[in-house]
């Protein structure tokens, strides 16, 4: 069983990802900002992080490096409704494991 951390300011995305994790037998935590996500990751090491790009406060792109510094072996999957090549390249350059554009199938 893995512990997954979902960071998105859209409650419906967090709800859907949490339900999917439950159905697959994983534990998860969902938060609405990168700052809250960093605190959650400090409390309990996640096995994977799903992180939105556009968040209140710190952006997902800014947060990638902070998560990498905290847990370098934990994959960070970036999700965004505003996908463009420049952002995708920047996310991967900063250490993202994968880059997905919303909407995506669960």
Image: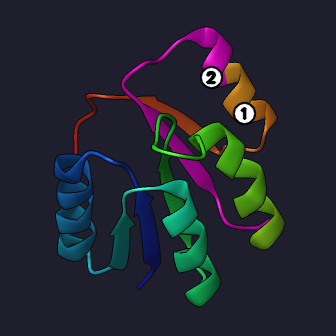
- The residue nearer to you, when weighing 95 against 32, is 32
Q: Quadrant of the N terminus?
A: bottom left
Q: Is residue 46 visible?
A: no
Label 1 crowding class (10 Å Cα cut-off): few <14, some 14-19, many 20+? some
Q: Secondary structure at mark 2?
A: helix
Q: Is 65 on the left or on the right of 42, as rendered?
A: right
Q: Position of residue 35 (x, y in %)?
A: 56, 62
Query: Mark 1 = which residue?
Result: 92
Q: Is 84 on the left or on the right of 1, as rendered?
A: right
> Label for residue 68?
none
Residues tagged 1 and 2 counted as in contact (Cβ below 8 A): yes
Q: Is residue 89 visible?
A: yes
Query: Mark 2 = which residue?
Result: 88
Looking at the image, is 80 positioned above or below residue 30? above
Q: Which residue is depicted at the point 18% across and 55% down? A: 16
Q: Which residue is depicted at the point 63% across and 20% down? A: 87
Dividing the picture into quadrants, the one containing residue 44 is bottom right
Magenta stretch: give its range: 72-88
């Amino acid at each position: 069983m893995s512990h997954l951390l979902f960071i998105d300011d859209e409650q419906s995305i967090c709800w859907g990802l949490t339900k999917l994790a439950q159905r697959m037998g994983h534990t998860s935590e969902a938060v609405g900002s990168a700052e809250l996500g960093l605190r959650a990751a400090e409390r309990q090491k996640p096995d994977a992080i799903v992180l939105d790009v556009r968040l209140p406060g710190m952006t997902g792109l800014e947060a990638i490096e902070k998560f990498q510094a905290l847990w370098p072996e934990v994959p960070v999957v970036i999700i965004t409704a505003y996908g463009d090549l420049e952002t995708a390249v920047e996310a991967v350059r900063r250490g993202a494991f994968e880059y997905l554009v919303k909407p995506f199938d669960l």
